[in-house]
Amino acid sequence: MPYAFGGPAGRGVIRAAPTDFIVVEEISFALKGAGEHLFLRLRETGCNTAWVAGQLARWAGRPRHDVGYAGLKDRHAVTEQWFSVLCPGGRHPDPATLAIEGVELVEWQRHDRKLRRGALRGNTFRLRVTGLEANPAMLEQRLQAVAARGVPGAFGPQRFGREQGNLRLAERWFRGELRPRRDERGFALSAARSLVFNAVLAERIENGSWETAAPGDPVQLDGSGSWFIVEPGDEALPGRLKALDVHPTGPLWGRGGPPGHGPGAELERAVAARFALFAEGLAAQGLDQERRALRLRVADLAWRIEGDVLELSFGLPAGAFATAVLREAVDVD
């Protein structure tokens, strides 16, 4: 993936300790305070989301599928996230009895429906890069550019699995060499979609169009999944793009072709042809074409450089990766 602002200004280490990477999620709806679903906001240190969900099911005496969460969080971090547990009749264990290693109960409420995957407004990050070796003036310049212009919204390497295992699984599946287990299919499909999207984004960074749109291109409203096709003569569009009110989009590949008819659609078809195995495999699995913003607004970005430590805080929309922000400023191990 090419860089949008000329490359990192230095290097450092991320996640030297779990407290160097703190993530706090915000779900997309208000809790009602009544209902059969017990919602628990948990602070987890060094814990895998799916593992915590299994521990909650055991604690509540419920099947694993009665436990919900909005998104997967990294194990090598301190995370705050919501879980829901179905408790028929509203009868549930005393939350004060919850005892899971590495997990702290922050708050709990009741609600009338399960927490579903993707029901996120966004995440707030607080990060520390240690062992920093950087050009201070260049680092300030990079961070100011990120704050003003956002960053390319690439899918992070974790989407592809350890040693790209999710992507390799998709490749073998689409070649007819194996059929993944049900619980593996979603990871394989997401990895294949992410590959095509990142390849389109890389092309648009290289040609300088990752922050622009032309007539016929689909653009997405900031903070929303809604998108529209740019009409010829839209005089307000350049100002809206500069203000990060709308963003150019790229494909989450599926059946049919890209919805636009501008230069962006031509580029997307060319990229999909290069990755025909993945594009055709996604369509064969019945996925429809969807859109994702090529650019991310980095909300409330603040930073402090003290000695060999860089501290950052910022907010990102759901589905965005903090690594997309970090890589534009510093190269991290």
Image (spheres, rainbow, N blue to C red):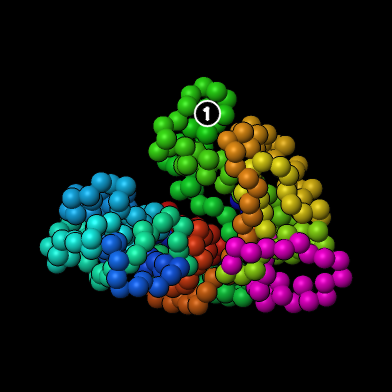
- In the figure, is residue 88 to the left or right of 112? left
What is the secondary structure assignment of the residue under circle 1? helix
Image spot of residue 104 (x, y percent): 21, 65
Outermost residue, left direction? Answer: 97
Closest to the observer, 228 or 141: 228
- In the figure, is residue 142 to the left or right of 200? left
Mark 1 Cα-neighbour bin, 10 Å: few <14, some 14–19, many ≥20: some
- In the figure, is residue 207 to the left or right of 110? right
Give, as a single range, the part of the protein colored magenta: 224-248
Q: Is residue 213 above or below residue 174?
A: below
- In the figure, is residue 313 to the left or right of 57? right
User: How many numbered markers are drawn?
Assistant: 1
Q: Quarter of the image holding residue 206?
A: bottom right
Q: Is residue 35 above or below residue 260?
A: below
Outermost residue, top direction? Answer: 177
Q: Residue at x 56, y 62 (%)?
A: 328
- Residue 242 magenta-highlighted: yes
Image spot of residue 148 (x, y percent): 62, 75
Which residue is under mark 1? Answer: 173
- Residue 13 magenta-highlighted: no
Q: Is residue 169 above or below residue 210?
A: above
Q: Residue at x 55, y 31 (%)?
A: 171
Q: Amino acid at mark 1?
A: Trp
Residue 284 visible in the picture:
yes
Closest to the observer, 143 or 96: 96
Residue 196 visible in the picture:
no
Q: Residue at x 43, y 77 (%)?
A: 304
Closest to the observer, 17 or 138: 17
